[in-house]
């Protein structure tokens, strides 16, 4: 996928949180640059985030350095979007 002439990597980040922390985690993550949406959900994951970065390395840095440092997160699973 391209945005304004440059390739962009998109991913869904599935997040498990501590009990009762989903709404706070989703709200905090929504303010991180590169996050396009952040919603608390029901099911095996508590928050689902959509993120975009210029390349896979920047996506990894976003997840490891920013998202995983949010208080209340116990586990993340990053699912890059592929265009088949």
Image (cartoon, rainbow, N blue to C red):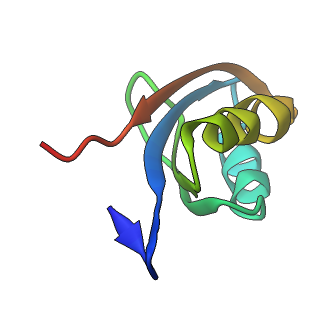
| 56 relative to 26, above or below | above
User: 34 or 31, which lies in front?
Assistant: 34
| x 84%, y 34%: residue | 65
Q: Quadrant of the N terminus?
A: bottom left
User: 82 or 16, which lies in front?
Assistant: 82
Q: Position of residue 34 (x, y in %)?
A: 66, 60
Q: Position of residue 57 (x, y in %)?
A: 65, 35
| 25 relative to 79, above or below | below
| 10 relative to 68, above or below | below
Left or right position of 59 against 2: right
Q: Position of residue 21 (x, y in %)?
A: 74, 36
Left or right position of 61 against 49: right
Q: Position of residue 44 (x, y in %)?
A: 41, 21
As drawn, the residue found furthest toward the top would be 75
| x 72%, y 58%: residue | 27
Q: Quadrant of the C terminus?
A: top left
As drawn, the residue found furthest toward the left would be 84
Left or right position of 84 against 74: left
User: 41 or 5, which lies in front?
Assistant: 5
Left or right position of 18 against 53: right
Figure disc tally: 0
| x 68%, y 43%: residue | 58
As drawn, the residue found furthest toward the front would be 5
| 78 relative to 62, above or below | above
């Amino acid at each position: 996928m391209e945005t304004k002439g440059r390739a962009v990597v998109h991913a869904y980040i599935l997040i498990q949180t501590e009990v009762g922390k989903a709404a706070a985690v989703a709200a905090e993550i929504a303010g991180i640059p590169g996050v396009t949406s952040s919603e608390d959900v029901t099911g095996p994951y508590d928050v689902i985030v959509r993120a975009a970065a210029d390349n896979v390395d920047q996506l990894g840095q976003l997840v490891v350095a920013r998202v995983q440092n949010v208080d209340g997160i116990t586990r993340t699973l990053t699912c890059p979007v592929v265009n088949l």
